Amino acid sequence: MKKHIVLIIADQMRADALGHLNGGRVSTPNIDKLAERGCSFTRALTPAPLCGPARCSLFTGLYPHQASGVLLEDKLGVRTPAENPLGFLTDMMINDSSIKEAPLLTDILRNAGYHTTYAGKWHLGNDCIHRWFDEASGYDNNEYLGYLRKCSLPLEGWPLSDSEVKTERTPHMSIPKAKVNPLKPEQCNDAWIADIARNYITSRPVEKPLFLVCGFNGPHPPFKIPEPYFSMYNPESYSEPENFKPTAGEPSCKEESFYRTLWKDHGEEWESWKKTSAAYHGFCSQIDYEVGRITACLEQENMLDDTLIIFVSDHGEQLGQHGLWHKMQPYEESLRVPLVMSIPGSPAPGKPNTSQASLIDVPSTILSFAECTVPESYQGINLLNEEELNRPRLLFSEQENLGTFHRENDWRMVTDGRFKYVRNLGDLDELYDLKADPSEITNLAESNEYKELRCRLARNLETWMQDTQDKLAE
């Protein structure tokens, strides 16, 4: 029988929130153990720093602008129509858009004998999830609210029910305020999702290999989390990042950005953000605990040594850096994500991998591991193939305007791992030397010294946009 596959997706978790990548500053022992059994990519990026588009790439192997129903102007898919930003920005509570692509990934796995299951946040349309999976649960937040009522638990234990952790501005969305959740950890939404995933493991048809996806809601804000996680990290131990304030040379749209406005609302001095950062890391540790419960269940079922486990996040979180809140930015805080794999029979377990990797590689890797043919349409590589990994490659990412409230420009990004070039449509472009300037403080786009490099990366970006039929290609 083929080996099992488990894909675990956190929401809005930065790569530097993993203990094995930050010297243990954040406690993530269970995810660290996954890395010890395989590898962790130190340079993994999201193809789009926004929930729906990133998840679209995770399941289709396509860039968001390639997938039907993804482009904002189509008013169809995983991005919200410009005239209705509330549909997206209430986030997990309302999801009235659906991915239009055929479920190639899971159809191929089904044909190879896999039983396909999904637990938790899906965010690609509740009306289509059962086309993708044999079994799915936990993706509808009303189901969790029903659980709270059934257990006679306070509804404010669901953070999105709490107006204190949302802005009073329009649109109504989460803010950086940190608050204690009255629920016990085992009653919280992500524990409930882990319970669903564990049930899929124990109730699986034993004659079939299992493909399980577990989508956590955390550590996506609001940062309303239970004890002991809320107080796990001391806010006073957090020093101000060197790129906390807005930097000279940024595109002009950043000053008008809705996410700059929310940053100012919370506080333009680092003192206001210490508790936010500490609570965020507590949330990351809470997610790690739930990851450990899933791997423990696999071990109890004698499946752990026969299971490829991939842990990722759809995108990162600005946490106030660059004077911005949330995500959707071409900066490292939004773009870099965890990508950890526990690999059965790994020849060099625990070795960090510095190769460039992307979430768009995940579906190709899953199908290759399952010994299935990867569709020609897939844009990623097989991360288990050393030859493919060792080839120099460019990574790309994208973001489109969410509507008039957003007050930012569409952008496209390309990086060779050392330099990053960002085309901001109708605004100042950006170029950063990630080795000399990892905090992206100095924009080199207007420097004559880097003109040739900027032009080369701009050509690379334009070629990619044309090859992938990006409507924004020149």
Image (spheres, grey):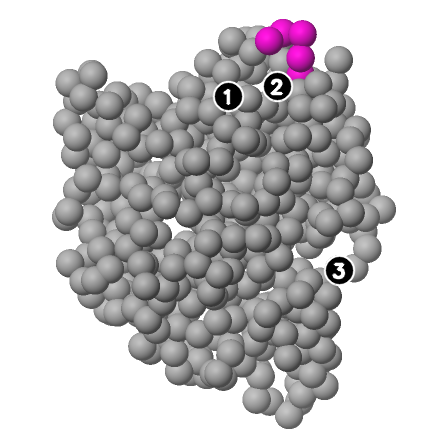
Query: Could you tell which of marks 3 and 2 lies nearer the N-terminus?
Result: 2
Cβ–Cβ under 8 Å for marks 2 and 1: yes
> Relative to 244, does residue 168 appear above or below in the rendering?
above
Q: Residue at x 31, y 33 (%)?
A: 141
Image quadrant assignment for residue 288:
top left
Is disc 1 placed on a helix, strand or loop? strand
Q: Which residue is mark 3?
A: 393
Q: In the rendered view, does 328 fall on the left or right side of 312?
A: left
Give yes or no for residue 451 being in the magenta stretch: no
Viewer-nearest residue: 158 or 379: 379
> Relative to 305, does residue 337 appear above or below in the rendering?
below
Q: Residue at x 18, y 62 (%)?
A: 169
Q: Which residue is mark 1?
A: 135
Viewer-nearest residue: 57 or 250: 57
**Disc 3 to disc 2, C-alpha distance:** 34 Å
**Disc 2 to disc 1, C-alpha distance:** 9 Å
Which is closer to the viewer, label 3 or label 2? Answer: 2
The answer to whether residue 365 is seen in the rendering is yes
Query: Could you tell which of marks 3 and 1 lies nearer the N-terminus?
Result: 1
Q: Which residue is mark 2?
A: 115
Q: In the rendered view, does 46 fall on the left or right side of 159?
A: right
Query: Could you tell which of marks 2 and 1 lies nearer the N-terminus?
Result: 2
> Relative to 301, does residue 233 appear above or below in the rendering?
below
Q: Residue 462, image x and y in percent? A: 68, 74
